[in-house]
Amino acid sequence: MFSARVPAQLGANRLAAAVAARRAAGDPIIDLTESNPTRAGLSYPTALLTPLGDSRGLRYEPQPFGLMAARQAVANDYARRGVSVAADRVVLAASTSDAYGWLFKLLADAGDEVLVPRPSYPLFDHLTRLDSVIARPYDLEYHGAWSIDVAGVEAAMTPRTRAVLLVSPNNPTGSFVKQHELDRIAALCADRGVAVIADEVFADYELMPGAGGLAARVLDRRDVLTFSLGGLSKSIGLPQVKLGWLAVAGPDGLVAAALDRLELVCDTYLTVSTPVQASAAELLTAGAQVRDEIAGRARANHTHLAARLASTPSCRALHVEGGWSAVVQVPSLESEEDLVVSLLQREGVLTHPGYFFDFARESYLVVSLLPPPEIFAEGIDRILRHFDCSIRGHE
Ligand SMILES: Cc1ncc(COP(=O)(O)O)c(C=O)c1O
């Protein structure tokens, strides 16, 4: 009865079942997977959402790409980061997931392919499958820093490839796409009529000073059709407000042709609420305070992690340039799944295993940098304690 776009097996995985059991028993959890900023103990200004109640929201004027004032506010926000894009090349969406769905409809037929980074954001599996598109991985390689295996991107391309997805900085590796990597990928794509889709939701969050400034700018491209994705979820820590966007660049003729077709897609869904569009400019301005707080939190936790792991030979923090997460390489004494379940059951610490993000090898733990510092520090201490015990247990 049901389509193959939705998985046949929907049961909870072992880690989710262990979390549910621990919660049901009333046992506390130090949650180092918490990446919802509204649950991370940040101090949001209490009046931040007041503009959503403005009477401008009482009038419905459906516009496929959104109200021009809101599109202009997003263009101004790109300008804040030094990126130039015209408001008429900005398209509003309810989230980046929404924007991905529209771009897949624009670019791909059922069975066409998009290339996705590995390791990366687990939702790509669902986002592609729900639009009947096939996700083909290309690798990010680690050798003291992450880089894109550009030869691997080329090798993964087939006549059915419609887009290459870039995530900059990537979740969870925290690596920004570099200019020389984009130059080579853009050349491959331009030759084959393939688009570049760059997820830049974490672009504001730099963990290594200067890393953001060295990141490639997809909206500067004139040689290849390019989309940049962003949204309030990460840029000002308001995932519940549901405002995302995409911005388009590339050869003028292709940009115009893409926008003509996207207009029909967006007009079919009209997902963005009027109150959020009417207040976009004010939210983007006032939200800077939240962004600063999140950035400070992520940097402080990252500094703590790096210092704490510097003196532990068994575990190491991988080099990270930006974003909200960190990757810890740990001894492979058991499978990653056994490890995360055992960390939860024995130490009360919840982490994500690397395989959730499709790391090529074991063993990695992915931790969010958003929890309050004292909770983060306690969680890291418990992880290290676990390995001290485990290593002694194997001696
Ligand atoms: C790389 C990446 N893109 C997009 C999103 C989600 O953004 P949105 O809430 O706008 O759909 C996330 C959320 O974690 C993410 O990690």
Image: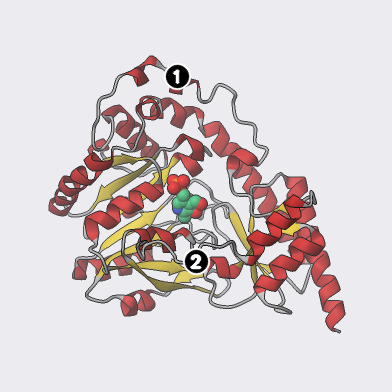
**Left or right, residue 240 beside residue 107:** right
Residue at screen point 44% across, 23% down: 52
Give me the disc on residue 185: none
Q: Residue 278 appears at what percent x and percent y? A: 36, 25
* Quadrant location, the C terminus: bottom right
Residue at 63% over, 42% down: 296
Residue with the mark numbered 2 = 9
Label 1 neighbour load within 10 Å: few <14, some 14-19, many 20+: few
Q: Where is residue 11 drawn, in percent x and y? A: 56, 63
**What's under tag 1, amino acid-wise?**
Gly
Residue 275 left/right relative to 34 = left
* Callout in the foreground (1, 2): 2
State the CA–CA distance, disc 1 to disc 2.
42 Å
Residue 381 pos. (x, y %): 80, 59
Front residue of 182/393: it is: 393
Q: Is mark 2 within 8 Å of ligand 1?
A: no
Label 1: which secondary element: helix
* Residue at x 73%, y 51% (from the top left corner): 23
The kind of residue tagged 2 is Gln
Q: Which residue is mark 1?
A: 53
Q: Nearer the viewer, residue 32 or 59?
A: 59
Is residue 29 among the parts visible in the rendering?
no
